[in-house]
Image: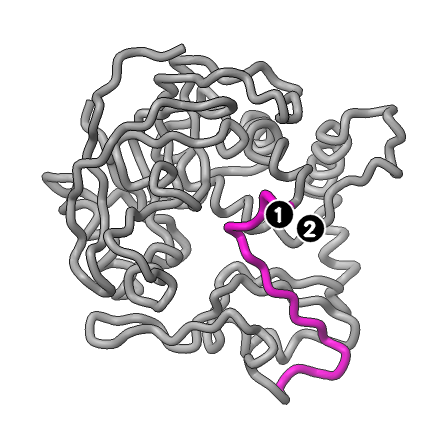
Amino acid sequence: MATNYPSTHPAVAITARRAPFSILEVSTEAPGPGEVLIHVKWTASSPADLHQVDGDLVDDFPFLLGCSFAGIVVGVGSEDTNAVSPETKHLEVGDRVAGFIASQPKHAGFQAFVTVPSWATGRIPANLSFQEAVTVPVNLVTAFTPLPSPLASIYHGLFPPTLLLKSMIKSFLSGERLAVSILSAAERVPYVLDCIGDVEGSLRPLTKIAQYGIRVAVVVPTIIRHASRQAEPQLTRDTSTVLVGEWKEGVKIVPVMTFSYQENEFFKWHLQPEIIPELLKDAHIKPNKHRVVDGDTLLERAQRALDLLRDRAPSGERLVWKVSES
């Protein structure tokens, strides 16, 4: 089922490493089985975009950018017979959604239309705007990626796994319980998640904290040297080479690849479609602080956001910008 949509649409791309952004006219792909077509209203820029533009992560050009999107469903593909049935109703034309994915050009968030698997998006609660909602998926998926999923052995069919996990999360996020948990762990934090992956900015301070037996989950690629307008970044995917000799004995460094979170079957089918929307709806989590990047055109907004990232201007905030005017 679909509404009318154009056969082509504008997309932000790079045509060479560290090249300025360009606008390409690309085909709008109809949704296949298990997919939805979304008219993108807002997107969010992230360090991952800067790594792709300035680093050595991209080999084939032109390359479409963006891993986050928020917009309106304008097309729904046929049922995917291999999919795990959601515990919420299927997406429909007209639904407001936000999501996170980056593996094919048709998924890239810096374009007017994206065609994505339904498991890569979820409904936006009525009390949130597009620009608020688009800050959430990439942050929460990154935080969830190193966590184990509920296993069949712990519920034996008595409760749906998402219900069990949501109950655990809500219990943990309740203020008094969270405070007690933090205080009780003050002498020895058992698990650390570094969502930044910056050797000097976040990892080196952690070498002073992490004790024997602690697992430190680090987002990769890890930043050894930041990108700037004058210099390329230095990145590494091999966390075993980072700060060798500075970690205390018994500390285990665990690399986290956010873009491969769907390898965990439970998170693939339930995290974005069900868990994140419910946590937002019940206010157990809140959108990230954000800064709106203005500009007269799609190209101008995209380039300004990238330049702000290169200048390391954002501090604790997500850069969001409008993709489609209508």
Q: Are marks 1 and 2 in contact (CB under 8 Å)?
A: yes
Q: Amino acid at mark 1?
A: Phe
* Quadrant placement of the N terminus: top left
Which residue is tagged 2?
A: 147
The answer to whether 24 appears left or right of 196 in the picture is left
Instruction: Pinpoint residue 31: horizontal percent, then vertical percent.
Output: 40, 23
What type is the residue that disc 2 sits on?
Leu
Q: Residue at x 37, y 24 (%)?
A: 37
Res. 1 visible in picture:
yes
Q: Nearer the viewer, residue 170 or 120?
A: 120
Bin the neighbour count of mark 2 within 10 Å (Cα to Cα): few under 14, some 14-19, many 20 and up.
few
Near mark 1 (Cα within 10 A), the count class, few <14, some 14-19 or many ≥20, is some
- Quarter of the C terminus within the rendering: top left
- Please name the residue that numbered disc 1 is placed on: 144
- Relative height, residue 223 to residue 307 (above, below): below
Q: Is residue 257 magenta?
A: yes
Residues shaded magenta: 246-263
